[in-house]
């Protein structure tokens, strides 16, 4: 349905009823706008280039519709062209970036159309239809951007800078305070739908998970009678394995793998201790004593010579000391 909205009794471009994202609204046919702007490019190339260049979003700024006119027959049967129904906001921007007299006229025309639509709904429209957003509206945008960029940690500044930069580019302003009040709804929708390109950092492990891994490392080293420095060495091995500066920076999705790594180190430590004990018994019974039974006297002689089993055993020295004990 074509709307009767016009400016100074002249209808430059038909304002029609359209549906974008299941929402009925007023807009226009991009093909008709292209013709009015007197752009020399083919319509299909022009509209696709503009959509890509200025980040217009389907079902938010425009909708694809099949033209009613059959334009070609022959191989492949009847083929119909694709038309674009666009919002008045998108139409204004397309007109503005054309940078010619036709573009200026179209932009002013669409501004007047918006003004008439607002007045028809009982809204008070300022004489200066390009009035910029108020301080409270600026605060609303700031809060939306802050919420949008939550969870970016150290990259939050970079993420917010990207959002504002894209808003400035999209709405052709050097700073957001220059946004027109009539653009407020479009700006909010654009920010909410925006896919931020700055990669959100991976969620890191919790304090509880950190201590689970640390305790597993301590348990592994305790079996060796090692010091806290040796626990740090094992934790450093985890840092190297996962390429992180600190264990607190371990991505949450790597927790199970890191805990398994520390637990395996503990298992290996106790398996090694069991092996050492077996070798010790063998040497005492078979090598040092030549088959003598493992008696309390021998145990006392061993402890007198060595104390508790050291982390690193020099078996040759132990044999010599036990034989002379």
Image (cartoon, rainbow, N blue to C red):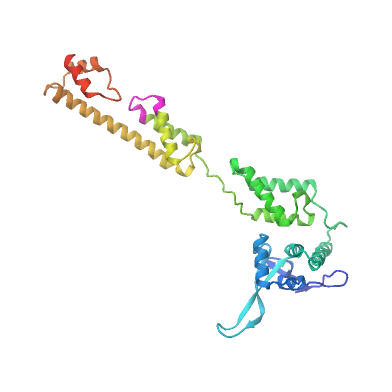
Q: Is residue 71 left or right of residue 130?
A: left
Look at 64% across and 48% down and name the residue there.
148
In depth, the one of 324 and 268 nearer the eye is 324
Q: How many marks?
A: 0
Q: Is residue 87 visible?
A: yes
**Up-down relation of residue 61 to residue 249 (above or below):** below
Q: Is residue 67 left or right of residue 282?
A: right
The percent position of residue 281, horizontal first and vertical second, equals: 19, 26
Look at 57% across and 84% down and name the residue there.
77
The percent position of residue 71, horizontal first and vertical second, equals: 65, 82
Look at 42% across and 42% down and name the residue there.
256
**Quarter of the rendering occupied by the C terminus:** top left
The residue lying furthest to the left in this view is 291
The percent position of residue 26, horizontal first and vertical second, equals: 75, 67
Q: What segment carries the magenta color? A: 220-230
**Quarter of the rendering occupied by the N terminus:** bottom right
């Amino acid at each position: 349905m074509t709307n009767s909205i016009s400016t100074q009794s002249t209808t430059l471009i038909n304002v029609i009823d359209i549906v974008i994202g299941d929402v009925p609204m007023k807009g226009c046919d991009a093909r008709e706008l292209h013709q009015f702007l007197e752009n020399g490019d083919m319509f299909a190339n022009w509209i696709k280039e503009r959509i890509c260049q200025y980040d217009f979003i389907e079902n938010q700024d425009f909708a694809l519709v099949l033209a009613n006119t059959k334009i070609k027959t022959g191989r492949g049967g009847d083929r119909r062209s694709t038309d674009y129904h666009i919002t008045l906001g998108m139409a204004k921007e397309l007109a503005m970036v054309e940078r010619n007299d036709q573009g200026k006229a179209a932009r002013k025309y669409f501004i007047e159309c918006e003004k008439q639509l607002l007045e028809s709904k009982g809204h008070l429209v300022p004489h200066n239809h390009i009035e910029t957003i108020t301080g409270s509206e600026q605060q609303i945008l700031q809060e939306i951007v802050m919420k949008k960029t939550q969870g970016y940690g150290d990259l939050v500044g970079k993420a917010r800078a990207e959002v504002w930069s894209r808003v400035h580019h999209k709405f052709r302003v050097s700073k957001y305070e220059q946004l027109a009040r009539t653009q407020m709804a479009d700006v909010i929708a654009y920010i909410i739908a925006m896919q931020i390109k700055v990669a959100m950092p991976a969620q890191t492990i919790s304090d509880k998970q950190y201590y689970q891994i640390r305790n597993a490392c301590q348990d592994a080293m305790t079996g060796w009678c090692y010091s806290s420095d040796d626990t740090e060495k094992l934790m450093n091995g985890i840092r190297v394995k996962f390429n992180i500066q600190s264990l607190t920076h371990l991505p949450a999705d790597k927790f199970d793998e890191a805990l398994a790594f520390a637990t395996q180190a503990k298992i290996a430590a106790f398996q090694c201790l069991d092996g050492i004990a077996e070798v010790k018994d063998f040497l005492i019974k078979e090598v040092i004593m030549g088959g003598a039974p493992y008696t309390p006297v021998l145990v006392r002689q061993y402890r007198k010579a060595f104390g508790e089993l050291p982390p690193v055993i020099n078996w040759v020295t132990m044999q010599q000391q036990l034989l002379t004990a």
